[in-house]
Image (cartoon, rainbow, N blue to C red):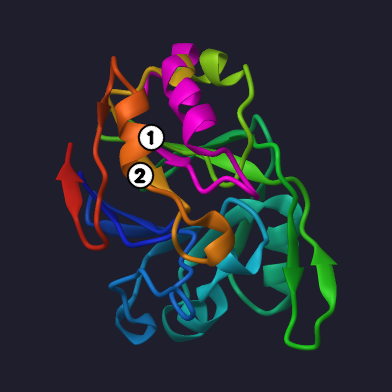
Amino acid sequence: MKISYHGHSIVKIETGGKTILIDPFITGNKLTDLKVEEQSPDIILLTHGHNDHVGDTMEIAKRCNPLIVAPNELAVYLGWQGFETHGMNIGGAKEFDFGTVKFTQAFHSSSYTTDNNDIIYTGMPAGILFTAEGKTIYHAGDTSLFMDMEMIGKRHPIDVAFLPIGDNFTMGPEDAAYAVKLLKPKLAVPVHFNTFPPIEQNPDMFKEMVTDHEVRIMKAGESVEL
């Protein structure tokens, strides 16, 4: 399994001949190395409806028709736009032919703003536990710190955890470092920082505060093999 990071909260997983994109915010993302027209994922996983996470999902889906797995209200909305979707909700898991997806809680908000500035409610925000090839990836989405992260880590031993550190809208470095203590992943990777002025952070601060787990600050395009 190959896992790569592509700026903001974009994660790409390649497993079993399938390519999965999580939160493909490409257009307007100054930190990404991706180009929309070059992305042809088999599956798109979405944590919530905010535009910096849904990103280019619809543009990509018009071209290559991936399965979009998302929190239910967001999946319904994208289904109304003509795309193939599968809606899920907090605590639910489903085994697909590419791996198992389980949505966890996340403490945030979730809505999609249209080109007409209409705000569409898109249900509960979520984190994602993705399991394939005997490995588990945790993408926390946008969230504050919460104590049930300890339970998530105990019930689902995590190989790689992608955790937001940008503060202002999500956890900052200190809370994210505490989240690592609760989750106990083999590897923690900071995400959701430096894309916009309100979330500018030094990821080295996060790394210095995590003293008992491995942290890797990944540049856009860097990958790990599991």
Q: Mark 2–mark 1 contact, CB under 8 Å? A: yes
Count of numbered circles on the image: 2
Q: Amino acid at mark 1?
A: Phe
Over which residues does the magenta segment extend? 154-181
Q: CA distance from mark 2 to mark 1?
A: 5 Å
Residue furthest to the left in view is 225
Question: As displayed, is residue 47 above or below residue 21?
Answer: above
10 Å crowding of disc 2: few (<14), some (14-19), many (20+): many
Question: As displayed, is residue 75 above or below residue 185?
Answer: below
Q: Secondary structure at mark 1?
A: helix
- Camera sees residue 101: no
Looking at the rendering, which quadrant does residue 132 occupy? top left
Q: Amino acid at mark 2?
A: Pro
- Residue lying at 62% horizontally and 40% vertically, measured from the top left: 143
> From the image, which quarter does the C terminus lie in?
top left
Which label belongs to residue 206? 1
Residue 108 in percent (x, y) is at 71, 44
- Residue lying at 44% horizontally and 85% vertically, measured from the top left: 63
- Camera sees residue 117: yes
10 Å crowding of disc 1: few (<14), some (14-19), many (20+): many
Residue 171 in percent (x, y) is at 57, 38
Looking at the rendering, which quadrant does residue 21 occupy? bottom left
Residue 5 in percent (x, y) is at 30, 55
Instruction: Read off the residue under disc 2.
Output: 203
- Residue lying at 60% horizontally and 74% vertically, measured from the top left: 83
